[in-house]
Image (spheres, rainbow, N blue to C red):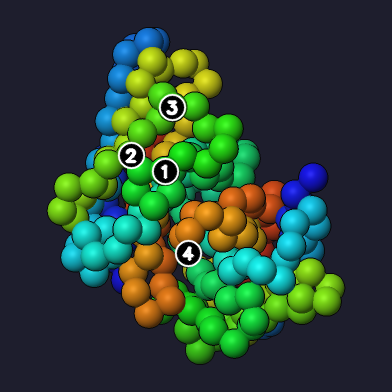
Amino acid sequence: QSALTQPPSASGSLGQSVTISCTGTSSDVGGYNYVSWYQQHPGKAPKLIIYEVTKRPSGVPDRFSGSRSGNTASLTVSGLQADDEADYYCSSYAGSDKFVFGTGTKVTVL
Amino acid sequence: EVQLVESGGGLVQPGGSLRLSCAASGFIFSGDWMHWVRQVPGRELVWVSRINPGGNIRGYADSVKGRFTISRDNARATVFLEMNSLRAEDTAVYYCATEGSPAGLTPWGQGILVTVSS
C-alpha cells in the first residue's frame, strides 16, 4: 500500500496556472474512477476540491479541474490567487476497502 | 451546520491503548461511510480506516490492521477508533471525515493529537 507519488513542490505566478501530477498504479489511480484532491492550509483540516477524478463539490470554483491519463491523475489550478498557496493531496480508492493518499505537493504563488 | 468533533486523544505509552471518538452533527450520519485519516505534523496525510453506514464493512491500512478497530454508533452519530498496541510511529493528528461524495471526504473534523511516548 504505497503512497501515490506527487512532486514535492510546484509554483506559479498570480493569475497563471499550475498543474500537479499524482502517479499511482493500475490497482488504484488507473483502476477506479475514485480519485480525489484535497487542499490543506497550514494548521487546518483538508478540504475536498475534486472527487471522482473530475467533479467539483458545490462551492469549489471552476478554476480547479481534475483529469487522468492512465495511472496518473492531475490537478490544474487556473487563475492562481494568493489563497491557493497551500498543500495539495491526491487520494484514490485502492480496492479491498482501502484508500491511499499522495505524498503531497506544496504550491507557492509567486 | 455540518460538524465533526474528535475527542479522546492525548499522551499514551508505547504498547498502550486509546479510544478516539468523533461526534457528528448537521447531516444524516447513518447514511454515510466514515473514515479516519492521520497526519504527522509537517508530513503527508495517511489513510487509516473506514466503515460503512451499517457498521459491518471495515477497511484498514496495512500499518494498523490487527491493532486498530473502527466502529460506529448511529444512534449517537459517533464513530470510534480503538487503538491498541500503540507505537511511536502512530503519533499523529487523527482526523475523522465523512465520505460525503463518492470516495471524496467532506467534511473533516478539526483533528486530535495522539502522542505515543514513554
Residue beneath disc 3: A62
Quick check: A48 above or below A84? Answer: below
Q: Real-space Cα distance between discs 1 and 3?
A: 10 Å
Residue at 61% in and 45% down:
A45
Residue B70, image x, y percentages: 62, 79
Residues at circles 1 and 4 in contact by the CB criterion of under 8 Å: no
Residue A101, image x, y percentages: 39, 57
Label 3's element? loop
Q: Is residue A76 left or right of residue A43?
A: left
Residue beneath disc 1: A55
Residue beneath disc 4: B47
Residue beneath disc 2: A66
Residues at circles 1 and 2 in contact by the CB criterion of under 8 Å: yes
Callout in the foreground (4, 2):
2
Which of the two residues, A107 or A25, is positioned nearer the viewer here? A25
Disc 4 marks which amino acid?
A: Trp
Task: Tell which subunit mark 2 falls on.
Answer: A
Q: Real-space Cα distance between discs 4 and 3?
A: 27 Å
Callout in the foreground (1, 4):
1
Task: Tell which subunit mark 3 falls on.
Answer: A
